[in-house]
Image: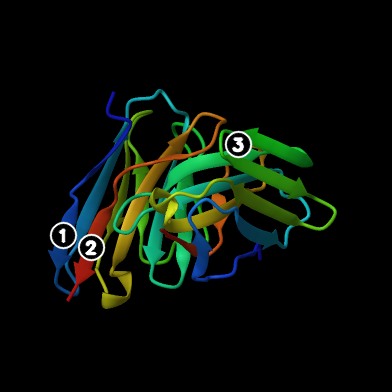
Amino acid sequence: NAGVTQTPKFQVLKTGQSMTLQCAQDMNHNSMYWYRQDPGMGLRLIYYSASEGTTDKGEVPNGYNVSRLNKREFSLRLESAAPSQTSVYFCASTRGQPQHFGDGTRLSIL
Amino acid sequence: QKEVEQNSGPLSVPEGAIASLNCTYSDRGSQSFFWYRQYSGKSPELIMFIYSNGDKEDGRFTAQLNKASQYVSLLIRDSQPSDSATYLCAVGFSGGGADGLTFGKGTHLIIQP
């Protein structure tokens, strides 16, 4: 049972490049989330999907898009990466219970 | 704007003592409250959750919730060096946090052998 799987684990991009972060869960959870974590800022919600077919903005959605591909998968896309998007990105999922987190993607934008 | 406040620490506690971590939140409509532990370079790991006023115990951990004071705490009894980590308080508006959680910035706990 893998839980929440994020790919890639590490990535370095140049400013202006695009990229999609992938997240998949095998726990049959309805809701999925993307957070970013920056030093001294804690975890901040970017986007979430309460159920398959729906997505909603969180606290810091600017510069990101998401796709809930199916019940298992929720991707996060950076269309034109900026240095301010350098962060650790966590995907999480839940089914009416506390959220379970993936191992994170460390993303650096040069 | 939903806000969750924690003392960033570091909080230093001798091994075997009780560690007390505190958190306040701004939104009176908050329904669910969580404590996560995060080791450096790792993902958050759920420790406790509580939905009702009062205390909830699980092994060496006790979560306490006071909705009137908008205050939630985590007590760790018989603290061990392996408890040294950052503890994140998180608050959800709906039961289970289905609409996403608001996190505090975390308290860095150090257990001194």
Chain designation of label 3: B
Residue at point 40%, 53% (across, down): B81
How much space separates mark 3 and mark 2, taking CA atoms? Answer: 29 Å
Disc 2 target residue: A107
**Left or right: where A31 falls relative to A110:** right
Report whether mark 1 lies on the same chain as mark 2: yes
What numbered label is drawn on residue A11? Answer: 1
Q: Which sits earlier in the primary sequence, circle 1 or circle 2?
A: 1
Would you place residue B1 above or below residue A65 in this image? below
Disc 3 target residue: B96
How much space separates mark 1 and mark 3, taking CA atoms? Answer: 32 Å
Chain designation of label 2: A
Q: Amino acid at mark 1?
A: Gln
Q: Secondary structure at mark 2?
A: strand
Percent position (x, y) of residue A13?
Answer: 15, 67
Residue at point 31%, 66% (across, down): A87
Please tell me which residue lies in front, B24 or B102.
Answer: B24
Please tell me which residue lies in front, A82 or A24.
Answer: A24
